[in-house]
Image: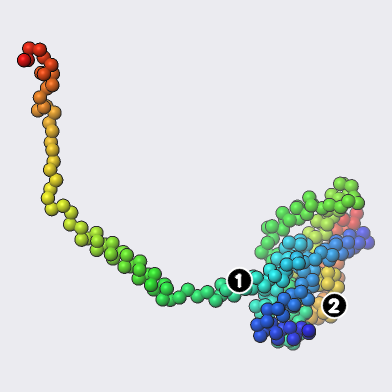
Amino acid sequence: MGTEKYINDLIEREKQMVPSPYLSTRVLAEIERKQLQANYRPSVWKAIALAASFAAVTVLGITLGNSYKGDYYPKLGMNINDSQIENLEYYNLEDYD
Amino acid sequence: MTDSELIEKINSGNTQAFKELIEKYQGVVFRTAMGFVHSKADADDLTQEVFIRVFESLHSFKGKAEFSTWLYRITANCSINFIKRNSKNRLLLSLENIFNYYSNEKTPLEQLEAAERDRLIKAAIDRLPTSQRTAFVLSRYEELPQKEVARIMNKSEGAVEQLLQRAKGNLQKKLDKTVGK
């Protein structure tokens, strides 16, 4: 008998609970969101234009890279050999004059 | 406005009519969901899920059965699926309920005992086989007659009576040693 009473008490307490007052608003908002999502179809032309622009940029990059010819005139290189530089100590020597 | 008038309006795109339908039946769906999940937050989510399902499949409702029968059937199916999906979270929830149990009339020890008793009863209901549990919830939470429960579950009245007897027996067998001692 005790068990049955406790079960009934629990059921009665749970039955007293009420749903959220915003339930209908939440449901309608969710339905609207789902409908918007279902109606959104990405345009085929948009996808084609996007792919074409990527391809054009890639081709342009490769063409520009290939058209670079570099310098026609070689740069001057300086080779300084330290051992050929005059030793400055000579100028400090008194008897040098 | 009758259910069939509301359904007709909803099917012709009247959102206000659907809002009216939700407000008319939200208590019924929420109580049934509470019987399955025993948590207000989960029952709220479940009620929302049920009404979205109703909106999506309302065009397939032919009116052969009562709308409420159809709605109870969807609620029971959604609840069973919800429980299967969230079986891991339910252990945490039952522990949370122990700590959140509060009543001014009881001492802390009595409160703890009452919370533990509730937890055991909920666990025993949750462990019932699906068909026994569905029959139990519809009969005890919604106080539906066996004839209506039988229509919702697509079973004979005799079968529902047997399910309810078994559910009662199983609950007493599980709880008599712990709750009813």
Q: Residue at x 73, y 56 (%)?
A: B93
Q: Furthest-front residue in view?
A: A97
Q: Which residue is mark 2?
A: B146
Question: What amino acid does circle 2 point to?
Answer: Gln
Instruction: Assess disc 1: are there few (<14), some (14-19) or many (≥20) residues with their C-alpha within 10 Å of its C-alpha.
Output: few
B106 over B52 or under it: above or below: above
Question: What amino acid does circle 1 point to?
Answer: Arg
Chain under callout 2 = B
Q: SS of the residue at dot 1?
A: helix
Q: Quadrant of the N terminus of chain B?
A: bottom right
- Viewer-proximal residue, B181 or A84? A84
In the rendered view, does B175 fall on the left or right side of B44? right
Which color scheme does this rendered protein use?
rainbow
Q: SS of the residue at dot 2?
A: helix
In the rendered view, does A38 fall on the left or right side of A8? left
Chain under callout 1 = A
Residue B179 position, x and y percent, is 87, 56
Gap between marks 2 and 1, in whole Å? 39 Å
Q: Furthest-top residue in view?
A: A95
Say which quarter of the image contains residue A91: top left
Residue A10 position, x and y percent, is 85, 61
Q: Which residue is mark 1?
A: A33
